[in-house]
Amino acid sequence: MAEALQPVRGTRDLLGEDQRRFAHVVDTARRIAALYGFDEWATPVFEDTRVFSRSLGETSDVVSKEMYSFTDRGGDSITLRPEGTAGVCRALVSNGLTQSLPQKVFYAGPMFRYERPQKGRYRQFHQIGLELIGPSEPQADAEVIALGHHILRALGIADQTVLELNTLGDAASRDAWRTALIAHFTVHRDALSEESRQRLERNPLRILDSKDAADRALVGDAPLIDGFLSDAARAHWDGLRAALDRFGVPFRINPRIVRGLDYYSHTAFEFVTEQLGAQGTVLAGGRYDGLVADMGGPATPAIGFAAGIERLSMLLNSPPPPPVPVAVVPVGEVAEAQATAILQAIRSRGLRAEAAYRGNLKRRMERANRIGAVAAVIIGEAEAARGVAQVKDLRTGEQREAAADDVPAVVAALVAA
RNA sequence: GCGGACGUAGCUCAGCUGGUAGAGCGCCAGGUUGUGGUCUUGGAUGUCGCGGGUUCGAGCCCCGUCGUUCGCCCCA
């Protein structure tokens, strides 16, 4: 026997119930998004590497060490998408849609990041995401967040999450704040953890959500964004909170929330849970007013979020059950020939039906039971000769005879009961 | 990329201070002629993750490697 091959590290198969949970998350999100006027887009799974290197920031971890990049046979640098927003913005520009705003986009699909796998973190993982491109009003931010909340509610997991909210200000506010943070932490440089000393160079905002105890002490009296907000940025921030109140979405302000990717400004938010260990962020996003311009389009405001389908699936309490089937159990050649027509007739009525073709009657009934059938249609030699079938209710054990033509209707009534 | 734990039948796991493997579930076949869910009898199944080492002898000890998992980093 040849060696049994395994899935590649960080990837996994989704079978049966796993895939059912997964599909339920995507279907639910798609349905709710449609209620808010969002249309689904499907962009390619791989893109020109520059689509990501340009948008995410060269120094971000995603770009500097986590991308699945390769050179194709034509010599071009290609990258498996590590996230969805950059591709949507590229598509917006490529299709000339910057002339017809707003665009409200829903997407779902696989993403790829070369990371150390953990629970709820995979190298091929899947996201659902939303982008609202065009509006700059805080009302738009609130609507997108409300939509995210709506999806979590529809999935029955909203009460397992908390919405944390922050503002990063506009570019000017953020730069001023950043400068102040660098100044603050540089003074205490020696007290910082080694990791935070590196963050001081690359991404000083990250120090704010360090888990290191020594860092946290210094974070306590670090300058807050509040002191650096421009009038416009402050108005946006105030407007957002007021709008969220109108939508009835509860939130908690967390000044330490920053986004990992460079393109965010103003609003940053995360729905987090305690139940997934270190991978507690379940749905997160923010405003990215500069990204469309990075893709070669005109300056275009936008806000969006992405959510990890694996993480959402894990929070689902009860997986959606498979539809209840009907078992068709023929015995003997004549009966098997007749069973096909009955089988297809039952399916045509919209019921799930499967036939058992192996073993003696006892085996076939065992199989009917195992697949969870509520009804069995039994056709033996005697029934086949007379053009009838036995319809048995597997819950009660009651059995009655029906003419072959009537079987689908009888079975349908049984299933509905 | 860094640190800890783990890796035994399809699944969940046991295996005492080293003496060439076991349970439950599942699976297969019976308990008389055409009826499942309960019960009962019997049966098959493992290169003990992989490679090396120590030993008369290793699933148990040592080293390496791959994988899983928890935390850090980062992120959805």
Image: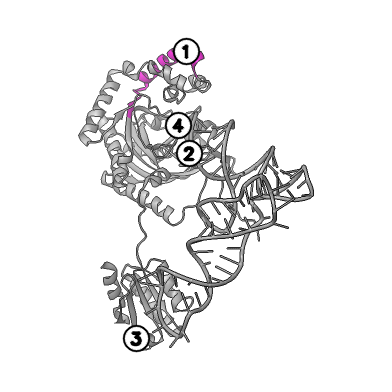
Q: Which mark is residue A82?
A: 2
Q: Earlier in the sequence, mark 2 or mark 1?
A: 2
Residue A59 place in picture, x, y as percent: 50, 27
Assess whether mark 3 and mark 2 are in contact (beta carbons under 8 angstroms): no
How many numbered discs sit on the rendered protein?
Answer: 4
Picture layout, residue A134 above or below residue A324: above
Distance, label 4 to label 1, CA atoms, is 32 Å
Write down the region rendered in magenta.
A165-192
Q: Is residue A309 visible?
A: yes
Distance, label 4 to label 2, CA atoms, is 12 Å
Distance, label 4 to label 3, CA atoms, is 69 Å
Q: Earlier in the sequence, mark 3 or mark 1?
A: 1
Picture layout, residue A388 above or below residue A306: below
Q: Amino acid at mark 4?
A: Ser
Name the residue carrying label 4.
A55
Q: Amino acid at mark 3?
A: Gly
Q: Which mark is residue A387?
A: 3
Assess whether mark 1 and mark 2 are in contact (beta carbons under 8 angstroms): no
Q: Is label 4 in a helix, a strand or a loop?
A: helix
Name the residue carrying label 1.
A188
Q: Nearer the viewer, residue A339 or A330?
A: A330
